[in-house]
Every structure is written in structure tokens, then in C-alpha cells.
């Protein structure tokens, strides 16, 4: 304990706080309301003053073991019990267990007369008795202003109220006093003069027919507090204030990549798809295929066995499934297996805060790996720009903290500069894929490109994507001197190129044939020459043979005649011839 | 308190007038409390002689009783009977408002 204290501020400098237990309020007030002091909660009719006060009391009794007294001037115990029962608080049970005392103060101008001097000791006595009977630490007075309407002497009343607040402080109870908002001042009767330690202002504003409640800590003497206006809502588990500034930028990050279900898109994202836990924005004009790409992404994730939560603000689940069926995406089995869940709601159903709270609840319950919000723009349309941005910030922060990948589709109106209209949102997104129409040649064609992808190499190319009954096919768009060609222009360009290639091929074949023909001609010539040669050669050989034969015959004849003449032939031959001749002779 | 004292009964019955039951809530014996009680007594003696009963409740001793009669201001007079219940706050120095408040017409 000592260690802990020394780490933070010195204990004597820190104002003791009384935690409200109300979600978000303790964050804004850095721990709760000032302990042992009165806090003023003011606001117009129907902005939740009584509920806030009642929740403070009930949570005190239930969570912090601090019994409380609720002194109600406007509603009876029965009414109060019924009202807070809708937030899941069992007021009657707490009263039975002596954790809470509800004292309904009935005061009606028509039922009494005033004569002479009096004071409000009766109120003090009642309050004191109620506090002492259960050892209350918390007190709610809702709302003291009823007294102003019913007691004639205002100056006197002010003196008595000053006394009451002093008395409450002396009593050491943490009090919440509600008051009606005044036109010029915080409260109609200037109660803020007396309750000066902490003032919380509630507000209920209607923008474009959608009401949102806001809470602001106007004043908190001696303590740090968030000064902004925070939206809050009254849900089925009480009030939750949604502070933006209390969220910090220190999410865990994952370097794991997840495929989009469109291989070519993955290829454009460094071949691996998006980072897990990142926020992805998909913008496009109407009919560019945002939902189709989302559904693809959802299907791919669900097929990997991941849980996908699909928030649809324009189409019903059945309609999405039917439409996706037409391009060959079968989502029903994934829904049946519990991997894909749809949540459809009209954006105008309730305010942004309520949507956000509903989404938080759904996400917490389903624990998805991927959340698709289709489209975020129709949701943002139900608040002002800054409210919308605040909401997206909170949603993204929430999802990132939970390591959930988020895909937001955003509808941009034609004619606007895409980048500009999405400036508010895009800075919050890690990746941004743009879908666009290209109009020309009497047709519209869809193209897609990655505008940004934090932390990964990505393609700078514009790709055309085609939607067929087999799904999405991303193809290279033709980028030539005259710009990007898509659709039939791309096809025409394709066929032009094809024709050129074909022509080239034909030329080549022609040339080849020519060569072959020439070779053949040459061959023929060669064989003709060869035949000539053969003929000639044969002739020559025949002549040569004839000449040879004649010469031999001549020689032989000469020899024979020589023998006949007994002429000396060659010497060496004479003996043989002689012998021969001798033999022949003998 | 439910039954009037025997001494008064014949008179009440004879005049067919209801008995007035008044409660005076005070806080200790402060000046306002004392003034209120004496003023109330004087008015009742004048207009309701013999037909009234005053119960003084000291909230210092019985704080739990404040809730029942919806007491905020002190002193407060509550006319329990005759119905309807009427309430007057203050030390009752303004006699006319008391008479109007208690719905007592002065006897002429």
C-alpha cells in the first residue's frame, strides 16, 4: 500500500474520490465524485439526471458497499423503482435489505398554506433519520428545485439550501443533487452557487432527428477532469459514458497477414493480404462492389475458421446472402456453422452512441476475428462529422485493442473528390482500397487500387475487377498513352494487339514458306545438275573404257605380229619368250 | 385519540359537529415552536372551543414521524380530521391564513 502510494501522488494532495461505478464517468473524473461533498448534476428534461443519480446510489450500495438515501421530490418510490428496473437495478430489493432508503417528499402548493415563520428542519430531520437508519454514505436529492416552485419565499429558501449543503458536508455524505437546466445559468434557480465542488452538465441534443445525450464536467474543484463533452447513453445496464480521450494509442500489433479471398488483391498487397488487427477502409461510389469485396473477405476469413461479424446498415442478412449467391459466394453454410454472424440495423434506428454501444456489445459477445461494417458512412450520416469521427475512432480503438481486423466500407457520392470526402476517416485507417467507376464508350467499368497500406509494400497499379457468376476477378487494366482502358475498350485494345500478333505470325509463316520453297527450288536445281553430271560422267567413263580397250587390243596385236616376225623384243623377255617359243618349238 | 374525551362527547353529539384533530410538528422547544403552539391554541379556543384536540410532535424525539405527514417545514400544523387533510406551515402569526388554511370560518 505504502509502495503504491509513493508511486503516485502524495495522499494528502489527492482529493478523496467516491467512485460512481458508472462506466466511463469515473475515467473522466479521474476516480469519481468528490467524497463527502455535494455534486450538482444539471440538465434539461429527459436527459437522464435522475437515472444518473439513481445509478450512483445503486452502484454504491451494490459495488462499493456504501448504503444510500434517495430523497425524491418528483417521483414516488414506486415510480422510481419501476424506472430503474429498466436498467436492471432492483431498488425494492435494496430497500428491503436496508441498503437504500427511498424517501418520497410530497410537496404541493395547493395543499398547504403558509402563516408566519418556519424553517426546513423537517427536511433535515427526515434526511438525517434516513441516513442514520442505514448508515448511508451517499445521498441523492432529486430534485430540490421542486421546493422553489412550492415554497413562497425564495430568499428564505436559498438560506435554507445553503444550510442544507453545509449540513450535508458536515455529515460527510457524498451527495448528488439534481437540478433543472436554466436558460441563462446552469440551473434554473442558481443552485450552482451553493454546490460548487463538482458540477456535471447533462445535455440531450437532437441533430437531424436523432437525439444524443452528452455529459460534461463543468467544474471539479481541486481535481483533474476531462473537460470535453462526452456522449453517453442509457442502455439496459445503466449509463455508459464513452470518453474518447481516455483511450490511449498503445495497441498490440500483429505482423500476421490475412488473405482477402481475392488472390490478385493479395498480390497487390505484397502478396500476403492485410495485417491482422488492422483497420481497412474500402471506399467507392455506388455500385462499385464494396459489399461484394467485403463478403469475399468475410467468406475467406470464415473458411479459415475465423469468426466474422458483419454489421450491415443497408441490407438485411437474407438480402446480402441472396445477392452474394449470384456471384457464387455461399455464405449460408458459414452462418449455419456459427462462423459468420450478421447484424443488421437501420442507421436511423437510434443515435450513434446507441449504435456504438450495440456494436460493442455484439463484438464482446461474439468475439470475432474480423468485423465488417457496411457501410460506415450511413452510420456516420446520423451524427455530425466530428461525432462520426469520434465514433469511428472509438470503434477502431476498441477493435484494435481486441486485435480484431476491421473492414469499413464507405460510400462516396459521385462528383466529390474521393480523397477529400473521406479525409476525416482515412487518417484512422491503416489500409485504404479505392473502388472506382470508369465511364467511357457508353459503359461503366470497375477499377480498384490500393491507396495506402501502412507497413507493407503494395502495388501502385490500377486494376480492373470483373464481377461474374464465379466471383471477383481482378485483371490488369490496360494503361496506355491515352489513359486507363477498361471494359470493352480494354477488350478492343486486347483484340487489336491480338490482331497485330496474328498478322506478325502470318508474316513469319509466309517467310518460312518462302524459305522452304527456295530451299526446295535449290534442291531441285541441285539434283538436276547432279543428274547432268551423272549423265556426263557416265558418258565420259564409257568413252574412256572404249579408248582403253582399243589400246590393249592394239598392243596385243603388235606383240602377236612381233612374235610372228621373230623380232627381238625386250631383252629380259627374250629368254622367256625364247623358252616359250622353244617349248612351243619343241 | 380515536375517541374524544368523555367530557366533550355530549356536546359534540348535540351539535353534530366533527371533532378536529390537529397535529403540530415542532422541533425541540425553539422560539418558533413555542409561538406556533400558543398561536394555534388561541385560534382553536376562539373558533373551535371544545371541539379540537392538538397533538404536539417533537421531531427531535420522533424523527421517523416526519415522513408520514410529509413534513418539510417546521413548525407545521396538520389537520387530520375533518378530512381532507390540510397543512399550514409557519409559526401561525398570520391568523387569517390559518383560518383560511384550516378552512375555519370565523363565527359571526
Image (cartoon, coloured by chain):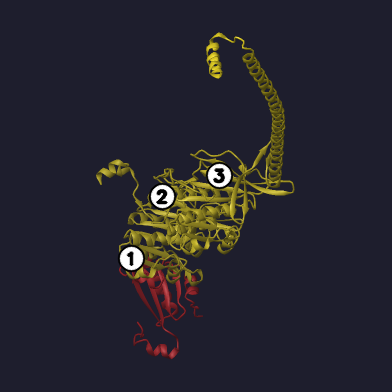
Q: Residue extending furthest right?
A: A442
Secondary structure at numbered mark 1: loop
Q: Is residue A47 visible?
A: yes
Q: Splitting the image into 4 quarters, where does residue A568 fall?
A: top right
Residue named by callout 1: A99
Q: Residue B90 location in percent, x, y?
A: 43, 67
For marks 1 and 3, give the one nearer the viewer: 3
The subunit carrying tag 3 is A
Sequence order check, earlier mark of 2 and 1: 2
Q: Splitting the image into 4 quarters, where does residue A489 fall?
A: top right
**Residues at discs 2 and 1 both on one chain:** yes
Residue situated in front as seen by the camera: A558 or A5: A558
Q: Splitting the image into 4 quarters, where does residue B85 fall?
A: bottom left
**Chain letter, yellow in picture:** A
Residue named by callout 3: A432
Q: Is residue A179 above or below residue B98?
A: above
Total numbered labels placed on residues in the image: 3
Measure the alpha-carbon separation of dots 1 and 3: 54 Å
Q: Residue A278 location in percent, x, y?
A: 48, 46
**Residues at discs 1 and 3 both on one chain:** yes
Whether pointer 2 and pointer 3 mark residues with C-beta atoms closer than 8 Å, the reply is: no
Q: Which mark is residue A494?
A: none
Residue named by callout 2: A27
Secondary structure at numbered mark 2: helix
The subunit carrying tag 2 is A
Q: Is residue B37 above or below residue A569?
A: below
Residue situated in front as seen by the camera: B72 or A512: A512
Secondary structure at numbered mark 3: strand
Amino acid at each position: 500500500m505504502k509502495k503504491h502510494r509513493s508511486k503516485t501522488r502524495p495522499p494528502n494532495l489527492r482529493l478523496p474520490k467516491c467512485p460512481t461505478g458508472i462506466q466511463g464517468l469515473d475515467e473522466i473524473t479521474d476516480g469519481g465524485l468528490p467524497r463527502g461533498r455535494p455534486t450538482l448534476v444539471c440538465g434539461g428534461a429527459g436527459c437522464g439526471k435522475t437515472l444518473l443519480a439513481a445509478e450512483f446510489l445503486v452502484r454504491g450500495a451494490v459495488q462499493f458497499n456504501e448504503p444510500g438515501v434517495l430523497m425524491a421530490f418528483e417521483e414516488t418510490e414506486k415510480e422510481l423503482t419501476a424506472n430503474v428496473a429498466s436498467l436492471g437495478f432492483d431498488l425494492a430489493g435494496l430497500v428491503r435489505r436496508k441498503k437504500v432508503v427511498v424517501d418520497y417528499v410530497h410537496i404541493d402548493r395547493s395543499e398547504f398554506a403558509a402563516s408566519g415563520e418556519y424553517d426546513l428542519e423537517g427536511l433535515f430531520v427526515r434526511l438525517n433519520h434516513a441516513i442514520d437508519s442505514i448508515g448511508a454514505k451517499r445521498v441523492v436529492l432529486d430534485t430540490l428545485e421542486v421546493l422553489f416552485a412550492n415554497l413562497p419565499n425564495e430568499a428564505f429558501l436559498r438560506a435554507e439550501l445553503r444550510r442544507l449543503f453545509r449540513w450535508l458536508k458536515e455529515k460527510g455524505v457524498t451527495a448528488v443533487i439534481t437540478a433543472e437546466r436554466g436558460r441563462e445559468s446552469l440551473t434554473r434557480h442558481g443552485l450552482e452557487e451553493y454546490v460548487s465542488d463538482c458540477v456535471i452538465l447533462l445535455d440531450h441534443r437532437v441533430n437531424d432527428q436523432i437525439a444524443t445525450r452528452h455529459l460534461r464536467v463543468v467544474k471539479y474543484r481541486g481535481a483533474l477532469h476531462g473537460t470535453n463533452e462526452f456522449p453517453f447513453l442509457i442502455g439496459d445496464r445503466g449509463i455508459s459514458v464513452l470518453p474518447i480521450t481516455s483511450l490511449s494509442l498503445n495497441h498490440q500489433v500483429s505482423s500476421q497477414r490475412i488473405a482477402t479471398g481475392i488472390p490478385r488483391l493479395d498480390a497487390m498487397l505484397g502478396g500476403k493480404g492485410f495485417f491482422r488487427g488492422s483497420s481497412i477502409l474500402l471506399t467507392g461510389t455506388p455500385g462499385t462492389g464494396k459489399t461484394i469485396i467485403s463478403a469475399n473477405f468475410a467468406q475467406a476469413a470464415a473458411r479459415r475458421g475465423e469468426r466474422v461479424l458483419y454489421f450491415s446498415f443497408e441490407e438485411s442478412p437474407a438480402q446480402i446472402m441472396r445477392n452474394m449467391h449470384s456471384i457464387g459466394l455461399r455464405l449460408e453454410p458459414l452462418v449455419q456453422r456459427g462462423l459468420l454472424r450478421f447484424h443488421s440495423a437501420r442507421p436511423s434506428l437510434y443515435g450513434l452512441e446507441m449504435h456504438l454501444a450495440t456494436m460493442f456489445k455484439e463484438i464482446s459477445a461474439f468475439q470475432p476475428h474480423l468485423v465488417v461494417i457496411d457501410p460506415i458512412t450511413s452510420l456516420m450520416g446520423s451524427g455530425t462529422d466530428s461525432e462520426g469521427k469520434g465514433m469511428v475512432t472509438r470503434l477502431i480503438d476498441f477493435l484494435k485493442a481486441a486485435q480484431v481486423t476491421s473492414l469499413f466500407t464507405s460510400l462516396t457520392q459521385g462528383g466529390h473528390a474521393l480523397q477529400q470526402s473521406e479525409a476525416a476517416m482515412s487518417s484512422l485507417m491503416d489500409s485504404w482500397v479505392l473502388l472506382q467507376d470508369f465511364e467511357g464508350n457508353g459503359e461503366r467499368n470497375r477499377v480498384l487500387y490500393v491507396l495506402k497500406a501502412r507497413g507493407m509494400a503494395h502495388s501502385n497499379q490500377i486494376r480492373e475487377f470483373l464481377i461474374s457468376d464465379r466471383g471477383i476477378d481482378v485483371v490488369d487494366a490496360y494503361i496506355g498513352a491515352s489513359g486507363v482502358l477498361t471494359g470493352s475498350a480494354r477488350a478492343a485494345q486486347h483484340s487489336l494487339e491480338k490482331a497485330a500478333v496474328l498478322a506478325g505470325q502470318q508474316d513469319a509463316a509466309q517467310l518460312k514458306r518462302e524459305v522452304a520453297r527456295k530451299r526446295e527450288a535449290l534442291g531441285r536445281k541441285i539434283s538436276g545438275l547432279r543428274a547432268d553430271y551423272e549423265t556426263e560422267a557416265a558418258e565420259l567413263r564409257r568413252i574412256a573404257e572404249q579408248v582403253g580397250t582399243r589400246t590393249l587390243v592394239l598392243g596385243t596385236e603388235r606383240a602377236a605380229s612381233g612374235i610372228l616376225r621373230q623380232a627381238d623384243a625386250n631383252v629380259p623377255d627374250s629368254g622367256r619368250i625364247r623358252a616359250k617359243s622353244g617349248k612351243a618349238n619343241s | 385519540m380515536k375517541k374524544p374525551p368523555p367530557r366533550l362527547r355530549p356536546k359534540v353529539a348535540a351539535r353534530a359537529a366533527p371533532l378536529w384533530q390537529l397535529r403540530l410538528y415542532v422541533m425541540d422547544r425553539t422560539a418558533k415552536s413555542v409561538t406556533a403552539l400558543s398561536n394555534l391554541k388561541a385560534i382553536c379556543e376562539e373558533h373551535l372551543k371544545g371541539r379540537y384536540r392538538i397533538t404536539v410532535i417533537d421531531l427531535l424525539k420522533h424523527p421517523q414521524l416526519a415522513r408520514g405527514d410529509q413534513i418539510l417545514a417546521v413548525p407545521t400544523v396538520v389537520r387530520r380530521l375533518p378530512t381532507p387533510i390540510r397543512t399550514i406551515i409557519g409559526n401561525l402569526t398570520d391568523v387569517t391564513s390559518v383560518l383560511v388554511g384550516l378552512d375555519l370560518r370565523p363565527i359571526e
